[in-house]
Image: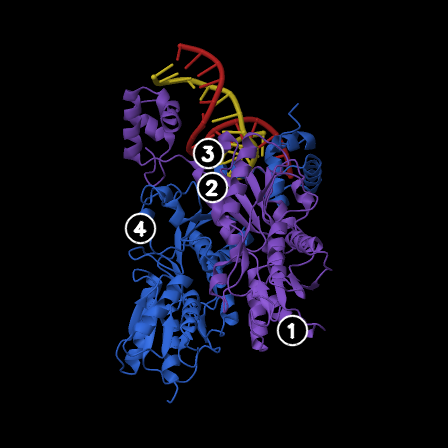
Chain colours: A purple, B blue, C yellow, D red
DNA sequence: TTGTAAGCGTTATCAT
DNA sequence: ATGATAACGCTTACAA
C-alpha cells in the first residue's frame, strides 16, 4: 500500500477502477472516446481518491511548460501591472500560467546573465517582452521560446508586436493644444533611448510640421512623478515661458502640475497640460487631466493572444497597432488673449 | 544523429565528453566531487553544445515545481503589484519563479473552481495569499502546498502570516488628528468584511478610547478613488460637519480631497485628511497627503522568506507584524479656533 | 474500446 | 571517481 499522505497517482485510480492507466488518462483528456460504463467507473475512482493530474509530469511528457513568461522592467509600476492583468486573463482561458520576471531587478550581477537563464523552452512556452531596453541578442539563442513584444519594443529584434499608436496619441495631444491657440509648447519626454519616447516625439513633430511650425522645447524626464515635478523648474527657466505642456505620461504630468502650482502658476489658466496613458488618477488630479487613453489591459490580452496564435501558425513580423484617443478634461484651456 | 534543431540533452553532452550522463549531472550540480580532468572535459562539451538543463525534467525528478504562486485580488492594483515585486526579488535569489494568479478574474464561472486547480503541489512549491476574501476550505486539501498569508489574511485559516501593523497605523493617524484638536472626525473605511478594514477600525477605536471619546462617524468605501470621491458628499451631509477625516487608504483620501475641493472646501483649512499606505502619489497630491507608510515591497519579501523558511522547518502559526509610521505632510492642520 | 509499454530528460542509488 | 540504471508520473503509439 502507498503512503496515504502522498498525492494519489494515475496508477492508484486505475487500480481502484479496475482499468489501465491509459484509460484513466483518456477519461481525463478525451472522455468521448471511452465507453460510458468505464468512464463512470473511472470518474468514481477519481472522486474517491481525490486525484488530480500531476501537471509537471504531463508537461514533461508533452514537451511544454504550461506557462508564459512576461518580462517587465518594473513590476511595481501600475502601468505594467495592468498590462499583466490582461495577459494573465488571456492565458488563463487557455489553461496557461503567468510567470513574471522583473528585468531591472534580475539584472543585478552579470549583465543580462540573470535573465538569460529564464529564456529557455524548458522554462516557458513563450515570452512577452514589455522591456524595450533589453539586448536583442538575448532572444537569438535557438532554445529561446517564441517572443511577442508588447507596448515597448526592442530595436533590432524582429517578430510580432502589439503597440499602442503612440505617434497618433502624441499628435492628438499637440493638435489639441495648437487648436486652443497655444504656440509656445513644451514636450516633457521619457528617456531618449526609450522607444515609446521616440515614437511620441515623432507624433509631436508631425503635428507641428502639418502647420509648418518649428520644433518645440524639450525636457527629458524619466516617466516618474519626481521628474515631472522637476520639469516645473525647467519650464520657469525658459526665456519665453511655454503656455502649454505635453508630457509623455500622466505621472510626469501630475508631478509637473504639482510643481507649477507650488510656484504659483495656475492650470489651465497659466499653463495647459496634456498627459498620456489615462491612469485612474488622471481624473482625480488636482485639476482633472486631459490625456491620451490607451487600453493597457486590452493591449496585454492582445499580446497574449498573438503569442498563442503564433505558436499554432507562425506568421512572422505581424505588427498590431492599437488605437488611442484623446480624453479632454480640465487641464487644458484656450490660450489667454487668443 | 539527433535533429540539430532540438535542444541538446544531457546525453549529447555525455557522448561528446566521453563520460556518462551521471557525470555530466554531477559536474552541473556538484562540481567538487568530480575529478578536475573530467570536469574540464564536460565543461568543454557543455560549452560546445550550448547545453542547459531541462528544468521541467529536473523538477519532475526532484518532485518540485521551481515556483511559488501568488494569489492577488487585483493584479492591476499598484498596492499589490509592489508587494509582488518584493516577493519576486526574494524568490529569484533562491532560483524560484514567481507565478501570479488574479483571484478576482479567475473566479468567473464556478465559485473558487477556477482557483482550486492551481492549489496543488504539482503546480506550485508554495502559496503566498494576498487575498483575504478567499474561502479557507480552498487550502485544506492534502495536496495544497505550504501557505503564507501576507498583508490581508483569511479568517479561519491558520498558519504563518506577514502583516503590517494596521491597528497601530490607524491609531497613529487618529492620535495625530486628536492632537491637532479635532474632535469631529470621520472614518472612511474599506469594505467591512475586509480584514484590513477591521484591524484599522480597531486602531481607531483604541485611539478614541484612550481619551474616553465616543466612536466617530463612519462611511464605508471600497479602497477606490471613486469611493473616496463619493465620501465627500456623505461628509457634507453630516449634521455636524467633520473637521477631519481618516481614510483607510491613500486612493480614497485623494478621491475625497478632490471631491471636497470641488465643493469649495479647502484642505487642510476646512478639513484635515489622513490616508494610509503612502503611495508615491501621496506626496504629489493636490495638497501633499499626511499618511501612514507601510513598506510594501519589504512586506512581500518577508512573506517569501517566511515561506522558504517554512519549507525547511515548519514552525506553524508564526505571525510577523511589520512596523508602520506616520508621515506628516500638508493635508493636516490644527483645528481652526482650537 | 481497452491494455501494454515506450518514452519525456533528469537525478540519485548502487555498484564498480 | 565514475558508470549503469531505476525511478519521477504521465501520455500516446501500437496491439489486441
Count of labels in the image? 4
Nearer the viewer's eye, disc 1 or disc 2? 1
Say which label, 1 or 3, has the lower sequence index.
3
CB of mark 3 within 8 Å of CB of mark 4? no
Q: Mark 4 = which residue?
A: B135
Nearest the viewer among A151 and B113 is: A151
Callouts 2 and 3 close, C-beta under 8 Å: no
Q: Are marks 1 and 2 in contact (CB under 8 Å)?
A: no
**What whole-number distance in Å separates the C-alpha atoms at marks 1 and 2?**
44 Å
> Circle 1: is it few (<14), some (14-19), or many (20+) Cα within 10 Å?
some
Choose mark 3 or mark 4, whichever is in front. 4
Which of the chains bears the disc numbered 3? A
Q: For marks 1 and 3, give the CA distance.
A: 60 Å
Q: Which mark is residue A233?
A: 1
- The quarter in which the N terminus of chain A is drawn is top left
Q: Mark 1 to mark 4: distance in Å?
A: 52 Å
Amino acid at each position: 500500500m502507498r503512503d496515504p499522505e502522498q498525492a494519489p497517482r494515475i496508477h492508484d485510480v486505475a487500480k481502484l477502477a479496475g482499468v489501465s492507466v491509459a484509460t484513466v488518462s483518456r477519461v481525463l483528456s478525451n472522455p468521448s472516446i471511452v465507453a460510458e460504463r468505464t468512464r463512470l467507473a473511472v470518474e468514481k475512482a477519481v472522486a474517491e481518491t481525490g486525484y488530480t493530474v500531476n501537471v509537471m509530469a504531463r508537461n514533461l511528457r508533452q514537451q511544454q511548460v504550461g506557462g508564459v513568461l512576461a518580462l517587465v522592467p518594473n513590476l511595481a509600476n501600475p502601468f505594467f501591472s495592468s498590462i499583466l492583468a490582461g495577459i494573465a486573463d488571456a492565458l488563463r482561458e487557455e489553461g496557461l500560467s503567468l510567470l513574471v520576471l522583473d528585468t531591472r531587478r534580475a539584472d543585478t550581477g552579470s549583465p543580462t546573465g540573470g535573465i538569460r537563464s529564464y529564456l529557455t523552452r524548458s522554462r516557458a512556452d513563450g515570452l512577452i517582452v514589455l522591456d524595450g531596453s533589453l539586448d536583442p541578442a538575448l532572444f537569438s539563442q535557438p532554445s529561446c521560446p517564441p517572443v511577442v513584444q508588447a507596448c515597448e519594443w526592442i530595436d533590432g529584434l524582429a517578430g510580432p508586436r502589439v503597440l499602442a499608436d503612440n505617434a497618433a496619441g502624441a499628435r492628438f495631444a499637440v493638435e489639441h493644444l495648437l487648436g486652443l491657440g497655444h504656440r509656445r509648447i513644451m514636450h516633457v519626454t521619457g528617456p531618449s533611448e526609450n522607444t515609446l519616447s521616440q515614437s511620441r516625439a515623432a507624433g509631436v513633430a508631425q503635428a507641428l510640421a502639418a502647420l509648418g511650425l518649428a520644433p518645440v522645447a524639450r525636457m527629458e524626464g524619466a516617466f516618474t512623478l519626481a521628474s515631472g515635478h522637476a520639469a516645473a523648474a525647467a519650464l520657469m527657466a525658459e526665456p519665453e515661458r511655454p503656455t502649454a505642456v505635453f508630457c509623455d505620461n500622466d505621472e510626469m504630468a501630475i508631478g509637473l502640475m504639482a510643481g507649477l502650482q507650488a510656484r504659483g502658476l495656475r492650470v489651465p489658466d497659466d499653463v495647459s497640460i496634456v498627459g498620456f496613458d489615462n491612469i485612474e488618477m488622471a481624473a482625480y488630479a488636482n485639476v482633472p487631466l486631459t490625456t491620451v487613453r490607451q487600453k493597457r489591459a486590452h493591449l496585454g490580452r492582445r499580446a497574449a493572444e498573438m503569442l498563442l496564435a503564433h505558436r499554432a501558425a507562425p506568421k512572422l513580423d505581424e505588427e498590431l497597432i492599437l488605437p488611442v484617443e484623446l480624453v479632454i478634461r480640465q487641464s487644458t484651456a484656450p490660450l489667454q488673449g487668443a
